[in-house]
Image (cartoon, grey):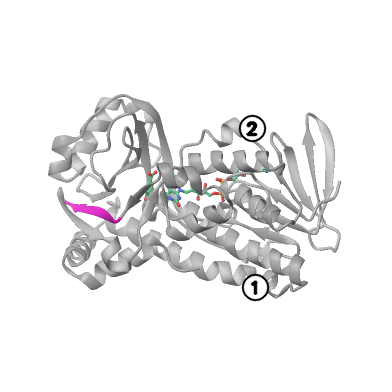
Amino acid sequence: MRTNVVIIGGGPSGLLLSRLLSIDGINNVVLEKQSEQHVTGRIRAGVLESGTIEMLKKAGISNRLEREGFKHDGIQLSFKNHGFRVNLKKLTNKHVTVYGQTEVTKDLYSIIRKEDGEIINNAEDVLPQAVNTQTPFVTFKKNGIEKKIMCDWIAGCDGFHGISRSIIPKSIVKNYERIYPFGWLGILSETPPVSDELIYANHGNGFALASMRNNNLSRYYIQTPLNENIEHWTDEKFWDELRKRLPTEAAETIVTGISIEKSIAPLRSFVCEPMSWKKLFLVGDAAHIVPPTGAKGLNLAVSDVYYLHNALKNYYQFNKNDDLKMYSQNALSRVWKAIRFSWWMTTTFHKFPEQSSFDQRIQDSEIEYLENSVASQRVLAENYVGLPY
Ligand code: RFL
Ligand code: PHB
């Protein structure tokens, strides 16, 4: 079997790349380790930048997004139970859209299936090979049978734990990493969100985030120590702790209920440089991870797809490979800015175990400055709504 581009990983980045390439008549096959049901059942990101919305429109999946997505013109920040608003619209003339990654993935699966794109689910032992030759290929097993796909290029869209990144020789790669000394305990509950806008709260007990998926589906997170045992967190204990950390007005009006999903995620910043080697390109979480505090992970995966799709299009339509050569550099320039912003949001809104009284005062004044300075709010707003591609 032969195709133009083999895409390893059928998460949001792999699916979006596949769809955009197919629209331009560039043949591709997506190899996904998990079942479709597994991929479309994962609860992950919730906030989309306007650049992401544009890309999803290009992919032809904006109908449901426009009907069911919620436009947010601002976010609420909170410090020691006192809330204040950052007006994203006024500061940047842009907004963000709340629409779950789960829904984005379902929409992409459905349009790719409808338009006869090729996604192979439950692909085992996927392995990119001969990546440094003119004849790269990918091998995998399906139902126990060995398969091989010859191709021109391989897109590694297989997330942080995927195989693709490990193909780049150690002598070429440099990894940059920060692991944060805490995690996020998240729940999903069929209750009306406590606020029309997201609330990011810094509290003496730790960070809290009030988010949502729709009018009767709330997503809440609290910072917990690393290696926290989820069994220790009954719904009641979670709600009590969340109430303590949110701004007073929100805590007083929150509607609680049973959690329909509960999980703990570690927080990490990670960048792999370069993001390409010979015939292989890394995209999204395969190349970089941000802590979720800035709501950037999915959006960064989409901006990588933007650069790679354009570069492949120029190659196939105009026989130009300059943009393919520049892919890593172009993508990384935007990646590092999002890494910085996500690190800053995390550092400003979380309690660190080793935080000294000096560090605490710095954090206090950072947030006080944010509340009272339009310039400071604009920096946050410009990054939160998403930097240009
Ligand atoms: P994914 O989504 O991890 O998809 C990779 C896919 O590759 C498959 N795979 C393989 N397939 C074949 N062979 C192999 N050897 C394979 N190894 C892996 C996997 O099964 C999977 O289907 O990466 P992608 O596409 O780059 O997308 C990245 C995003 O999923 C991620 O950045 C976001 O979810 C991060 N994130 C958020 N991002 C935002 O932009 N806004 C948010 O509000 C936001 N909130 C979040 C988040 C991530 C969170 N968690 C759980 C880490 C909130 C949370 C709690
Ligand atoms: C979410 O709704 O899951 C979410 C929203 C904003 C973030 C992180 C996660 O910064």
Q: Earlier in the sequence, mark 1 or mark 2?
A: 2
Who is closer to the viewer here, 180 or 265? 265
Instruction: Residue 71: give x, y in percent of width and height.
Output: 35, 51
Who is closer to the viewer here, 216 or 204? 216
Tag 2: residue type? Ser
Q: Residue at 79% of width from left, 56% of height from top?
A: 4
Tag 1: residue type? Met
Q: Residue at 26% of width from left, 46% of height from top?
A: 206
Q: Which residues are magenta?
A: 73-79
Element at label 1: helix
Element at label 2: loop
Give me the disc on residue 326.
1
Magenta highlight on residue 96: no
Q: Is residue 158 visible?
A: no
Q: Which residue is mark 2?
A: 35
Instruction: Residue 72: give x, y in percent of width and height.
Output: 32, 52
